[in-house]
């Protein structure tokens, strides 16, 4: 990170940025270009790591690419505003970037993932029909490294 003065070093603050972010952008290795897709998500901490859950329809480019290479990059950002600095204009923001792997999950683990997505999206305890899981692919993304950055 070039601007170390903007680095978020406190783990709790990094987790809080994820808690307040409404969307992640999932970067997938493609050929010849990378593929980035915005997604709703849920997350939790497991053994000192951030674990994200995302889903999608059973088929599509995202799934085809992840089947070939499950190494991903995730970005979550919160934009606050633009502001004048006296010498220009800057953005005030908070962001998190993480690297890890995505794996398809099933059964109770997929139910847990969908529950966490519903909770993060403001529908804690939502009584969805669990047969919906048969029509989607649920992913568990374990982040092996995470950094945070802010400009206020």
Image (cartoon, rainbow, N blue to C red):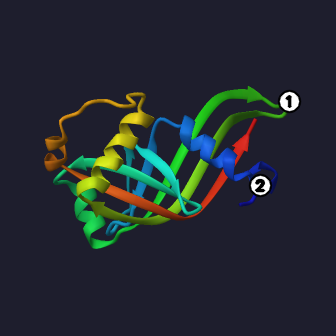
Residue 86 circle label: 1
State how many labels appear: 2
Identify the image quadrant of residue 42.
top left
The residue drawn where x is 35% and y is 31% is 125
Instruction: Tell me how far mark 2 sits from mark 1, CA to CA.
Output: 19 Å
Q: How many neighbours does mark 1 have within 10 angstroms: few (below 14), some (14-19), or many (20 or more)?
A: few
- Horizontally, residue 111 falls left or right of residue 7, namely left
Pick whichever, 95 or 110, lies toward us: 110
Q: Is residue 145 above or below residue 7?
A: below
Q: Residue furthest bottom?
A: 68
Packing grade of label 2 (10 A; few <14, some 14-19, many >=20) is few
Report the side of 103 relative to 143 (left or right). left
Of residue 29 and residue 147, the one placed in the foreground of this image is: 147
Question: Which one is nearer the viewer's eye here, 92 or 12?
Answer: 12
Q: Quadrant of the N terminus?
A: bottom right
Q: Is residue 13 visible?
A: yes
What residue is at 27 percent from the left and 72 percent from the top? 68
Q: Residue at x 57, y 55 (%)?
A: 97
In percent of the image, x 66 and y 37: which residue is there? Answer: 93
């Amino acid at each position: 990170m070039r601007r170390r003065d903007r680095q978020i070093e406190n783990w709790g603050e990094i987790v809080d940025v994820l808690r307040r972010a409404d969307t992640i952008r999932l970067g997938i290795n493609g050929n010849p270009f990378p593929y980035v897709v915005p997604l709703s998500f849920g997350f939790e901490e497991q053994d000192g790591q951030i674990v994200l859950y995302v889903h999608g329809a059973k088929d599509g480019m995202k799934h085809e690419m992840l089947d070939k290479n499950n190494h991903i990059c995730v970005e979550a950002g919160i934009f606050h505003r633009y502001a004048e600095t006296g010498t220009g204009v800057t953005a005030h923001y908070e962001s998190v970037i993480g690297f890890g792997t995505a794996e398809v999950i099933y059964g109770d683990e997929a139910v847990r993932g969908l529950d966490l997505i519903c909770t993060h999206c403001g529908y804690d305890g939502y009584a969805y029909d669990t047969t919906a899981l048969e029509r989607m692919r649920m992913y568990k993304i374990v982040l092996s490294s995470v950094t945070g950055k802010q400009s206020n």
